[in-house]
Image: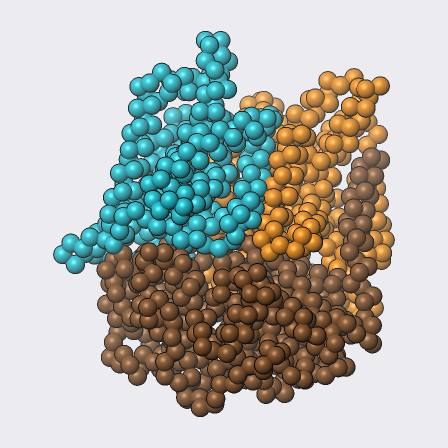
Chain colours: A brown, B orange, C cyan
Amino acid sequence: MKRITTAALSVLLLATAGCTDGGGGGNGSGSGNVPGVTDTEIVVGTHMPLTGPAAGGYSKIAPATKAYFDYVNANGGVHGRKITYKIKDDGYNPANTQTVVRELVLQDKVFAVLNGLGTPTHTGVLDFLKTNRVPDLFVASGSRSWNQADKYPQTFGFNPDYTVEGKILATYIKENLAGKKTCFLGQDDDFGRDSLAGVEKILGAVAAKESYVTSNPNVGPQMGALKAAGCEVVVLATVPGFTALSIGTAAKIAFKPQFVVSNVGSDPTTVGKTLGAAAPLMEGLVAANYLPLNTDEANPWIQLFKKVNAEHNGNAEFDNNVVYGMSVGYLFVQALQSAGKDLTRDKILETVQKNGFQGPGLVPLRFSAQDHSGYGGEQLTKVENGKAVYFGTPYTTDDGDGPVAPYQGQAVAPPPSGVPAA
Amino acid sequence: MTGRTAAKHEAETAGTAQAPVPDAGPVLPKRRRRVHPVIVIAAGAVLVVALTYMLPPFRNYQLATVGAYFCVTAGLTVLTGLNGQLSLGHGALMATGAYTLALTQNRWENLPLSFAMAVLVTTVVGAVIGLAAARLRGPYLAGLTLAVAIVVPSVTSTFDETFNSDQGLSVFLNPPPEQYPIEQWQAWLCWGAALVVVLLLALLVRGRFGRDLRAVRDDETAAKLAGINIARTQVLAFVVSAVCAGVSGALFAYLAQSVSPGAFPLTLSLFLVMAIVIGGLGSLFGALWGALLLVVLPALSQSVGEQTGSQRLEGNLALIVFGVVLVVVMLAAPGGLASIPSRMSRLIRRNR
Amino acid sequence: MSEFVYLTFDGLSRGLVYAAFALALVLIWRAARIVNFAQGAMAVSAVYVAYSVTNATGSYWLGFGAALLAGLALGVIVERVVMRFVDHSSPLNGVVVALGLVLIFQGVLGIVYGNEFLPFETPFSRDAFVVGGVAMLSRYDLFVFGTVGAVVIALTLLFTRTAVGLRMRAAAFAPDVSRLLGVSVGGMLTLGWALAAAVGSLAGILVVPTELGVHPTAMDVVFVSAFAAAVVGGLDSPIGAVVGGLIVGVLLSYVSGYIDVTVAPMAVLALLVVVLLGRPGGLFSSSKARVA
């Protein structure tokens, strides 16, 4: 019978583990029955890679968002409520994402999941979040999967999708590098595929295309093949580490094409760090962005975010991941402000759908009843003296065959308090 | 050197003790007052059903994950603990089951059929790997199975029209009957499958097959002299444990409503081995301990990390805790957690 | 043609790193009958030491030396503090303890340095010499060739020409007899671990600058390739480790270059299947079947 006792004990262990923190989150709803919302608090959560090979750079996003929330809380919160941001590490493993998102929703009873990061990781929890009617806001990835308003009415993206970006990068090539032999290196998933689709919509078939997988940090063979194909322009749909690796490897074999890089993989701080002494190779690199650049000291948004970073983020190194995280935080606070004092899950979804947000972004968000994709365009950047700088005007387009059009709208400045008004 | 497993070692030391020590699970031979597996499993089923009514939803989900892990750890226990074959590739076999379930389910929307297909396909894959594995010993087998473990993302990317590369597939599922919360339903399904799998394993290893397994593990030459077909026994052991892994993978696909290679990384395969060794090799109860650890330990250490509030501690602390537990258990109690009660009782008896 | 030349040199350069790493695995296997799964994590720890020293002093070579010393020290510590107390009645125990060490190392490194890829420089240019329009190999590749070559020669001399080497071999193959003959078996074991860990660290410091940078998991992939190399060559054979490393390196390079990079792990699996089904103890195994 000892076996059974052991078994019983072991299951009890599980049960007690459940009781230790089960009580706290469960019955904390003061105003009505909205999970995660009381008169004094709004609990939201996210999943991010804080450990593992994918954590580089990305692990700074959620702390930056949290820092912005702390700043808002220190300034009185939103409608008298403080925002609590629960950050769960999933190590970029979709199986862990399943667990931590369930923990957030079922155990911590979060009001919404905010800025969950990664295409393969977040794809797996769409159905779960839908079943539990949890708002799934501003997913941190440029996949087009977040834009399925019929199937996943509670999910909204944030990043411009990779096809939109591909079209804008290709337009630059078409206008400025016409006649050059253009090739493509992309990650072997939606990121690479959608990006290539966007590029080919504008340019037609590329001269050569290669792919890489994150589990194999060697792009020597691919760069060799692109060189052999005589490429003069190479579009990279790569994460930062692989951008650095590609540029470094190309230089190694005396292959010096013009690189045109996706926003996701172009943060000069992150890429430059990986390149180390070879960082000058980045000079002239063309990329795109849709948020203020971390090095643009004159930008009022950057001034605001730097202040928040100093006060609430332990003065973490100020790169574009921090700008991104704080922009997400700003947008969420905007949505909370417009949703009003009687916050419900339906209300926040309605508010986001209504759109009309004006924030740090250079182009408008596309949110509407039918469209749940995030920013609708980007502006091109070029690396000069180790810093990315914007040139030209922002462009907007769609992920279909729509034209790539310059966007004329004016950038707005943040409110003096740094907290969006109700 | 091949198969001198901890279980055998433990059985030997137990044999030298004066008093009969009930330290080995129902799968070890010649223990007095053995409870029939059917009774144990029935008791387990009652316990699980009772628990699902007591636990909050998230704990029910975790309970379901324990059940899903239990399938694979039980199968791996039979392979490694009883037959002495080390596999570092069971994560890949789980992926096989998971992808089979996803593909079948998305085409025919019939869950029992999908599980049956998962069993069928992993049987075939297990047989293929098992045939190769039967020729190999020790680290060479480890090397081959390690290569199997890392081939998953490569296969899904190369044949991305079927498997959709790193992004994986979502699984079409009909919602469970309305009167039951979904997490409770998940726990029932996973534990139902786990208990059936474990019951079958327990019955299987009680009989002649179990004796053959241990004979091959302990001394191949002697086993051969006794007329046991070594290669056949080893391949069968591999197939049995592969099927268990396939069922487990299918359960995970069901739980997650999605499959992707990232969910079956090399670390999963390694964690499985660690879990059964910590749990205690050679006993199906050790496998239960292992499954429980796979769920509880990361969760506990993550909540500790959260309470300290440091970004860097979070996640990393979990690794350290898991690592320290592993090393300490291995140094202090190489028989695994399942052997601790008997060690304790032996200690107490010695002190009396 | 130019692509073939380039792929060959690229593969050989990486293959030599795999070879060095596989050599470290073989050294420990021969001495202690343990496949040291913690080799990668130990090597990364040493590379982090090099990173810190190089950043503090500005000298690559001081960092290089510090990494080798750190490797030696780690080998001694791991053997004396942990591995010595592992119950060897089952070969699994050693494997599992090593896996536990991997988690501890990676966790500690993650806390101390963060989970970011940190840049690590090469002492020589990685730009390849271009001969007649064909990219050949770089100064850094030559440095890798030279270093690994020197290590292989030094180890060969150690084991075949010196008394210490003889004692180490004796302690590994016949511990009881050696003990009777007055050889400090424990000491030889520690020495074996220290040497192996230093060679592993060397491989780490050579390969990390050619990839994404220093990261707690930076050697995981290298470990898998190197383990495959050691198994292909035969775990008891240092020559096998070197040959196996070169085979795996060049194979991976050709497959990635001519077919597709996603196929590479399948190629490694296929190589293992073909070699092991033909020779279950690896290419350079001496015994007909391995029951150890």
Residue drawn at the location 27% of the way across and 56% of the way down: A252
In the foreground, B230 or C27:
C27
Residue B348, picture quadrant: top right
In the foreground, C270 or B337:
B337
Residue drawn at the location 70% of the way across and 63% of the way down: A104
Q: Residue furthest top?
A: C181
Q: Is C153 on the left-hand or right-hand side of A340?
A: left
Q: Is residue B79 visible?
A: no
State whether residue C259 is above or below residue B24: below
Q: Is B58 on the left-hand or right-hand side of B258?
A: right
In the foreground, A90 or B341:
A90
State the quadrant of the N terminus of chain C. bottom left
Q: Residue furthest left?
A: C132
Give the total of numbered labels.
Answer: 0
Residue drawn at the location 81% of the way across and 54% of the way down: A19
Residue B112, picture quadrant: bottom right
In the foreground, A58 or B61:
A58
State whether residue A159 is above or below residue A401: above
Where residue A190 sits in the image (x, y, percent)? 48, 69
Residue drawn at the location 84% of the way across and 49% of the way down: B47
Where residue A136 sits in the image (x, y, percent)? 64, 73
Where residue B226 sits in the image (x, y, percent)? 61, 23
Q: Is residue C121 visible?
A: yes
Where residue A282 sits in the image (x, y, percent)? 33, 65
Q: Is A70 on the left-hand or right-hand side of A293?
A: right
State whether residue C205 is above or below residue B52: above
Q: Is C2 on the left-hand or right-hand side of A381?
A: left
